[in-house]
Image (cartoon, helix red, strand yellow):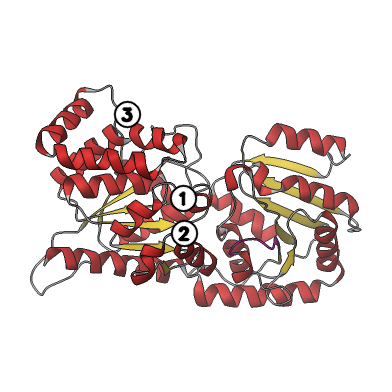
Amino acid sequence: MVAEWPGITPEPRRLAVIVTEFPKTTETFIMRDVVAFSKSGYDIRIYHLTHFNRREVVHDFAQQTIPWSRDFAYFASPDVIGACFRALWRKPRVLGRMVRDILVGCRRDPVMMLKSLFILPKSLRIAEDIREWGGDHVHAAYAGHPATSAWMIRRVADVPFSVSCHAHDIFETQALLSTKLPEADFVRTISEYNRKYILRHIPALATKPPVIIHVGAFLENLASPAPSQSEKMRVLYVGSLELRKGIDVLLRALTKASLGDWHLDIVGGGPERQRLEALTAELGLSDRVTFHGPQPNERVAQAMARASVMVVPSRIGPRNQTEGLPTVIVEALAHQRPVIAARLTGIPEIIVHGVTGWLFEVDDVQGLAYALEEVRGDPEEAQRRALCGRELVLAQFDQNKNADALLSLIDSSIEKNLK
């Protein structure tokens, strides 16, 4: 945290956070960290690599972050063009090596190569803004394009950076990872599965291995809720509507399970909504399924409080996109709600089958149906597992504690680079 000395008001440390999109409804875990950083006394700027998204729902707790965001053109603006010419004049060799490293690091992934070169001008402008602002550290919220931008800024502006690794940012492609991650002051990831995966693909990090800091939930004002008293079984899905999320598996499982009176609430938006609505009608479930669309975090919490069970039916999607350790599982267990999830990546680190919830094999419709029937048939066991899950969340997934752990690493980086 920011150091305090008797009788002296210290200058707040300046932390730049780089994301791809802003705002983004599904990235509550990033905004929670950012809000925690601000509460700890940091001056924050959020740099987003795509233009400000005016169509997204902004959660109430994240409204305060909007004035902290900074938007620049990709290239066609005088300030970005000027930043490119100044960088070329002052550090031509650095730019040349950077372009070379992008070409070599992305040689097997031409799409990533083109995107990395595309964000270069904007990153040079961000570097100037951070230098003029007096930024102390840059934290990339993902190992993909945000980390590429932070790496570029480190090379041209000498501002140290760190990276958080979650899921698709390391699973979808490893292009450039072995170049940029070893140059970070530290790499944070969210699960043991991810840590092993990163070390397997980037052996150079063996001497400076990724640090596991889980995504978290705010727990201080969250009382242990009573079990749902509804006669109707309320099944809940929260997340984006994408192929990799496996929502079709949940819909098909509900047609096979014997659950009595039930209703499925689907909270979230995405490209698969139309197809999923058509599948719902085809399966004859239209009167039992409600698509709520994207909702603020506060309404998501209300839906969890009403739910009988949360289902996370994820799979590996196109381009190896998949989960890391879904925040919705943390939130559902914080609300002491039973969780059924696919046995995938880091999920078994929080959903321990038979202890904190139910696991089923990826794409196993019948396995999910059996799990739903077990939750319905033995509510006492469902609540026992939900309580064990809540205790695990309280011990390891407290947002405030985990944000402090991340800030401690950032503080250490700043102190080291001040010497």
Upstream in sequence: badge 2 or badge 3: 3
Q: Identify which amino acid the numbered label 3 is placed on.
A: Tyr
Question: Is residue 342 magenta-colored?
Answer: yes
Residue at image x 20%, y 52%? 159
**Which portion, as a residue range, is magenta?**
340-346
Q: In this view, does 418 lie above or below 317?
A: below
Q: Identify which amino acid the numbered label 2 is placed on.
A: His
Spatial separation of the CA atoms under disc 2 and disc 1: 8 Å
Q: 97 or 257, which lies in front? A: 97
Residue, disc 3:
74
Q: Position of residue 160 (x, y in %)?
A: 23, 56
Q: Which quarter of the rendered picture does the C terminus lie within?
A: bottom left
Residue at image x 42%, y 40%? 107
- Is label 2 in contact with label 1 (beta carbons under 8 Å)? yes
Q: Position of residue 330 (x, y in %)?
A: 57, 64
Upstream in sequence: badge 3 or badge 1: 3
412 relative position to 63: left or right: left
Residue, disc 2:
201
Q: Residue 174 carries which label?
A: 1
